[in-house]
Image (cartoon, rainbow, N blue to C red):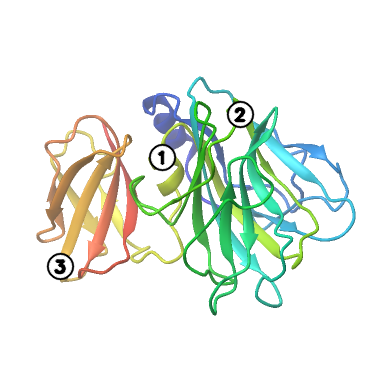
Amino acid sequence: MRKITFLVFLFITSLSFGQILIDEDFDYPNGSLVGNGTWASHSGAGTNAIQVSSGEISMLHGSGVREDVNIPFTSTSTVKYAGFDITVTNGAAISGTDNEYFAHFNSTGFRARIDVVPPTGAGDFRIGIASNSSTAEATWATDLTFGVTYRIVVRYDETSGQSQLWIDPSLESDTSILGSATSPTAVTSFCFRQSNSSSDETITVDNLIVSENFMSSSTLSTPQNNIGKDFSLYPNPLNGATSLTIQGLTNRNTSVVIYDMLGKEVVNTTVTNNTLNVSSLNAGIYLVKILEDNSSKSTIKKLIVR
């Protein structure tokens, strides 16, 4: 349940060339998701409905009829991205062979199907991707853990028919897995699905971003394993100022990388006295990646320059 003011959202959409197609934080009253926003059911309407609870949605695999939902979008781009936060829980590590997909793009067929699959080590589960098949064609290389929130980003290319998946990425060049190239089709909605799998796990989802741009879908939400959630940028928005202060830093070595909304690196430097020279930045929206003490964990903040 991400809090972004309406004014900032309007400014973002006006400068991002239509890249953000859906911005959904599920900030609705507890109860059925369908009936809020433009969400609709395309299967099992009202039966074991997908629920909103405390600003997130909850999906439970299980027997019997279960509701599947979709949210439509309009886009002229042939490449679509969807990013969302996911938390999986279950009484025991995922097992069995019936690994039902729970999210996908849709139009005339389901594309970029994402599912929860068994671990291969001592972890609880892994995530799989298939471009069109109901069975994962590629699986994330490391085990994941119940109760931990991960940022999943999925890409579907309407020209090649191929899907791609990342977990907690910062850049599109980060580690990913690919589904098989298949018959291409245009997609016009994003969907969540419940079914009866071997383990019947519970899946909680928040902060869905569907866009035409990787950076928009990957970093508008801060993954749980990031550091420095109390960091802030000042002033933000920048109105003619040439210096940016990163508030909340201690006296540590801090590297800062700034990307534009196309993912291009425009600044890469070390902060001195919590202050960064940003005189080279043109008007627009940027993502500021803060890395302290050579840590492998980072914080990403959004910066608006006017």
**Can I make out residue 292 in this image?**
yes
Callout 3: 10 Å neighbours few (<14), some, many (20+)?
some
Q: Compare residues 138 and 111 and report the one nearer the observer.
A: 138
Q: Is residue 304 left or right of residue 143?
A: left
Type of the residue with mark 2 = Val
Q: Is residue 51 left or right of residue 290?
A: right
Of the residues under marks 2 and 3, which one precedes in the sequence?
2
Q: Residue at x 16, y 59 (%)?
A: 274
Dot label at residue 253:
3
Type of the residue with mark 1 = Phe
Q: Residue at x 76, y 65 (%)?
A: 200
Dot label at residue 187:
2
Which secondary structure, mark 1? Answer: helix
Which secondary structure, mark 3? Answer: loop
Q: Compare residues 208 and 120 and report the one nearer the observer.
A: 120
Circle 1 residue? 214
Q: Quadrant of residue 189?
A: top right
Q: Give the distance between the C-alpha atoms of the residues marked 1 and 2, in whole angstroms.
A: 17 Å
Q: Nearer the viewer, mark 1 or mark 2?
A: 2
Q: Quadrant of residue 96?
A: bottom right
Q: Residue at x 16, y 38 (%)?
A: 241
Type of the residue with mark 3 = Asn
Which secondary structure, mark 2? Answer: strand
Q: Give the distance between the C-alpha atoms of the residues marked 2 and 3, in whole angstroms.
A: 45 Å
Q: Nearer the viewer, mark 3 or mark 1?
A: 1
- The image position of residue 102, as x and y in percent, is 68, 51
Q: Residue at x 80, y 58 (%)?
A: 196
